[in-house]
Amino acid sequence: MANMVEEGIVAPTGLIAHGRGEAFDYLLGERTTDNGRRAEMVAVATLLNGNRPVISVNGNTAALCAKDVVELAEAVKARIEVNLFHRTEERVQRVCAFIEEAGAKEALGRNADALLPGISSDRARCTKEGIYSADVVLVPLEDGDRAEALVKFGKKVIAIDLNPLSRTAKAAHITIVNEVTRSLPAMTAMVPELRRNGDKRLALINAFDNQQNLHEAMEIMRANLSSMQS
Ligand code: ATP
């Protein structure tokens, strides 16, 4: 990640966010829990049921797992759009090129021609053909303001966030409490079975309650902390 700062892919504050993630991953036990896996299945079902799914990529996600993003996007037929908290045209170009070097036909975001309502920063900038007109948006490692704005704008929001207490985790419709590099390949592997089985997709989606999901994730962390003490 430090090298990626030098490459201009990750913003310096991205390192702090990464450290926050690592701290929560310790509490989670640095593994995919059954809770995380269920949320991943619901997320894949939702992406497959979407008409215009988009995966929103920031610098940290690109640095950690550009190839995994590309593979999931291909599997669920989603567009990829780069959206940066610390946006400069040069950085957007750089991150888009990085994703394309990892195999994407096209990463949207260079020609941001629309604004997401409810955000005053540059993060509001998006593309009409991508996030602006998406129905489902997967936001790995998102900040709370934008996650809330996406929900208010009517998007079905799927977050990947190791911190079940974050505003993003609470605002999203589906929050995967897992590390992003464990999560994305596992999600891609789930696609063939779920693509074939529409009833299963619907059952997964209907049975899911994100509040309960976050409660379970916190319980797992609480239990891990207790067992570390004894
Ligand atoms: P919020 O604004 O949502 O309340 P925040 O201020 O922590 O939270 P950011 O720093 O923009 O927002 O979000 C980064 C989030 O991503 C953090 O919650 C962090 O725990 C999480 N995170 C960081 N690295 C990873 C990772 N590798 N996998 C999954 N989640 C991660």
Image (cartoon, rainbow, N blue to C red):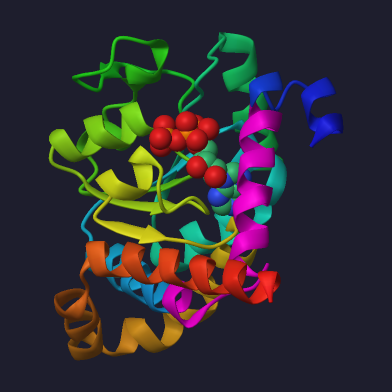
For the question of whether residue 102 can be seen, the reply is: no
Residue at 40% from the left image edge and 89% from the top image edge? 193
**Residue at the location (74% across, 20% down)?**
8
Foreground of the two, 35 or 230: 230
Q: Residue at x 59, y 53 (%)?
A: 24
* Residue at the image point whose x is 67% and y is 54% from the top: 67
* Residue 205 in view (yes/no): yes
Residue 127 lies in the magenta stretch:
no
Where residue 197 sits: x, y (%)? 27, 90
Outermost residue to the front = 230
* Residue 46 vertical position relative to residue 203 in the rendered view, above or below: above
Q: Whole-percent x and y of residue 96?
A: 59, 31
Q: Quadrant of residue 35?
A: bottom left
In the visual, does 50 lie left or right of 4?
A: left
The N terminus: image quadrant: top right
Quadrant of res 129: top left
Q: Could you say where residue 117 lies in the image, as x and y percent from the top left?
A: 19, 20
Is 56 drawn above or below residue 116 in the view shown? below
Name the quarter where the C terminus is drawn: bottom right
Q: Main secondary structure of the magenta part?
A: helix
Please say if 40 is above or below 92: below
Count of numbered marks: 0
Against 162, residue 98 (above or below) is: above
Q: Nearer the viewer, residue 101 or 20?
A: 20
Residue 30 is one of the magenta-drawn residues: yes
- The magenta-colored residue range is 14-37
Classify residue 200 as left or right of residue 77. Answer: left
Left or right, residue 28 beside residue 165 = right
